Image: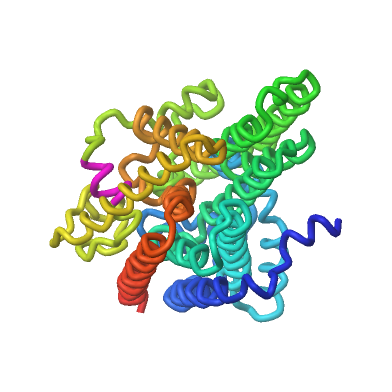
Amino acid sequence: MKRFLHLFHVNRGEWPAMIPVLLVVLTVNLLVIVHYWPLFSQPSDSIWGPFPSNFHVSGFDALLYTMSSRWNIFYNICFRHPLMAYLLIPTWAVTRLLLLITGYNCVQWVLGVQLVFCAFYGFLFFYRLLHDVLHLTSLESSTLVWLLLSFAMVMVSTAVPDHFVFSFFLLLLTLWLAGQRISSGKPLTTAETFWLFILTAGVTLTNGVKTLLAQWLADGRRVFRLRNVLVLAVGGLLIWGVGKISYELIVKPDIEARTAAKQKSGKQPHPQAPSQKQPQKDGQKSLLSNYLQWADTTTPRWTSFRENLMGETLILHRSHLLEDIGTGRPIFVAYSSSLPYIIEAFLVLLALLGFLAAFRQRLAWLALSWITFDAVIHYVFGFGLNEVYIMACHWAFLLPLMIGYLIARLTSWARRALTLIILLIAASMLTYNLTLIASYLI
């Protein structure tokens, strides 16, 4: 227990890097809460509440507000995020208690505490990865943490009621632990990998693959030992079983009851929230078919990479600021200036040079395996490609990590000069993106 609690102890030397992070994260969360409070604080008897139809920030879902206000499990939650609904039960309980006491739906504040917690510790784990594993100085590590914070969609993700900041927290915890073990030569134990897998896959199913990759790159061929394989197979079956049981016992009866009630009343079914479209004939399709419905073969890949993956992810577009493609935003929005493209290309170039500098490092190859897996999901299968920027918390931390390897390889004036350049870029991007977020929400 002490070892677990030690993960969350902030050392004195870490506070100079983390105080600016905490202030920015709190600011963005307060902006979101205050903006939506007049509407979202009012109790609602609707199963969806006022959230899906009124929350519009870059295509992020407000489903966590819905589930924390009136607990339920929805179709694509039970299979794509098998444990998310269960992890929100304490949030729902506190929200209901505050509703009884105050008469207001305080879900934004209750969930906001969790979002701030996950964001803060995600950045802290990243700082430790840079400082303790890559052996960067405190200033160099802080600079790269602030660079990550300055990324537009990372900053936004810390304050929206979606699952991404939970993934951010767990993935960076996994990466930090794997980096420690690679550096020390000690393996990630089967028990550690099992619980990391349950949590990461439980929040977002595909994150479980990254946990398995982390153990493989940290432990090598030891991952194929029979005991390890059997334990992780049990973990996979457990995750699948939770999703299946949730669907059969909660989701399916709820769908059938609501459908029967609508038919009995003679009313036409209300249109579903955009993010919760149901596959036809739920329960009759295979699980694979239900996932393949999200594939996208039509969105142009290069344009998506330029304007969305490396564009909106890092620097917000002023045109159609933070709009949702479901409410009028075009899939692609171009910058009015060439400067954002230059900055983004420069950061990508530094990251590529960093990987070359760390070519023999297993942690660098772990980072490459993660980003390759995401590339297959988004650019081969096309999952979420039309708004791929909202996935930033799944991979964007790998850019400053690779830049960290480049800084570590340099010496003397070149190292100081690059750190200063990165610090100026981070400060400029953070100011620019935060100003635009504030202008949208105020």
Where are the magenta residues, as a range? 303-310
Q: Quadrant of the C terminus?
A: bottom left
Report if residue 170 lies within the magenta region.
no
> In this rendering, is residue 384 above or below 107?
above
Q: Nearer the viewer, residue 75 or 221?
A: 221
Percent across and percent down for residue 288 are 50, 23
Q: Is residue 56 visible to the viewer in this orientation of the structure? A: no
Outermost front residue: 412
Residue 256, located in which quarter of the rendered image?
Answer: top right
Q: Position of residue 316 (x, y in %)?
A: 29, 62
Relative to residue 270, is residue 250 depicted above or below?
Answer: above
* Front in this rendered view, residue 185 or 64: 185
Q: Nearer the viewer, residue 129 or 261?
A: 129
In this rendering, would 319 be left or right of 131? left
Position of residue 149 in the picture relative to residue 418 (left or right): right
Image quarter of residue 111: bottom right
**Residue 94 x, y percent position in the rendering:** 71, 68
Q: How is the image coloured?
A: rainbow
Q: Is residue 282 left or right of residue 434?
A: right
Q: Left or right: where does residue 187 sit relative to residue 46?
A: right
Question: Which x, y percent locates residue 166?
Answer: 58, 54
Residue 411 vertical placement versus 275 (above, below)? below
| Residue 70, image quadrant | bottom right
